[in-house]
Amino acid sequence: MASSQPPQSLPRHVAIVMDGNGRWARKRLMPRGVGHKAGVDALVKVVQATADRGIGHLTVFAFSSENWKRPEEEVSGLMSLLLVALSKHLTKLKADGVRIRIAGDLDNVSEKVRNALRDAEANTIGNSRLVLTVAFNYGGRWDIVQACKQALAEGVSASELTEEVLSRHMAMAYAPDPDLFIRTGGEVRLSNFLLWQSAYAELHFTDCLWPDFDAEELDRALAAYARRERRFGDVGESGLGEGAIGSEGGH
């Protein structure tokens, strides 16, 4: 099903913090693992809906660098679920023209998980309908630090280190910055996700728990995005740019 929004009003890149799996399960008196499995099912549907609407990039926060602090049993379950999900859905995603890319520090994950993620990237490298970036063991602060380290390792001097240069070393340098940042589950924060890339993203927060997020919820977010005037700091009617002293939101 295509979006009802005109193509020019659609974001090129949607980023999602998929929050609420545990609460979804708790409401149903089920283990958290059941909620995470339902979250994978929701993701598969949202990937399809995003591709159907002609959006080129979807990035999802699958596992943050802070998630290691969760109970060992839950972390182990998440890793197992990832392997099962890739095994179950990779063939269909590939057939649907989805290219999978991974953003995050894979040095500290198990070899089995690392190989599965890299295999998913390799098996879909020829696709271009939708780039699905899975942020795994990712943190926005980590991303900025690793980009600085890469630039320094390449011999970039302090005087040469501009925003443009640093952007080329970010984990998702291949993608445009997110236009629309969605967080489900009722929380209203970024949680260290794509801090650099989301500087000008439109933020959409919903109380909908992630396993209940579907094509209809996606369309609500897209409709809200289409109603917003994106100015990127340009001079407005007041003569002051976004964020300037005296403008709305200024300090």
Image (spheres, grey):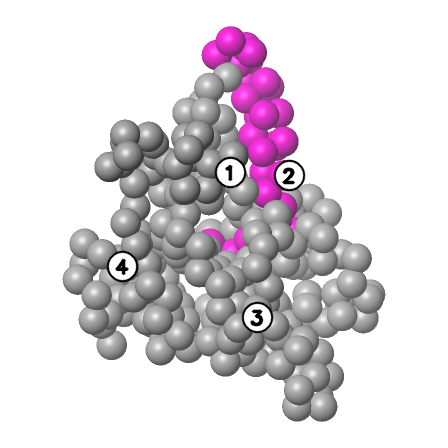
Cα distance, mark 3 to mark 4?
Answer: 22 Å
Cα distance, mark 4 to mark 2?
Answer: 32 Å
- Comparing labels 3 and 1, the label whose residue is closer to the camera: 3
Task: Name the residue carrying label 1.
Answer: 196
Up-down relation of residue 108 to residue 50 (above or below): above
Which amino acid type corresponds to the residue marked 2 in the rendered image? Trp
- Asked whether the residues under the numbered discs 2 and 3 touch, taking CB atoms below 8 Å apart as contact, a structural biologist would say no
- Asked whether the residues under the numbered discs 1 and 4 touch, taking CB atoms below 8 Å apart as contact, a structural biologist would say no
Secondary structure under tag 4 reads: helix
Cα distance, mark 1 to mark 4?
Answer: 23 Å
Task: Tell me residue 60's x, y (percent).
Answer: 50, 59
Identify which residue is drawn at 72% across, 47% down.
108
* Boundaries of the magenta span: 132-160
Judge by depth and name the residue closer to the eye, 237 or 117: 237
Q: Is residue 89 visible?
A: no
Crowd tier of the residue under label 4, counting other residues whose Cα lies within 10 Å: few below 14, some 14–19, many 20 or above: some
Which amino acid type corresponds to the residue marked 4 in the rendered image? Ala
**Nearest to N terminus: mark 3 or mark 4:** 3
Task: Name the residue carrying label 2.
Answer: 142
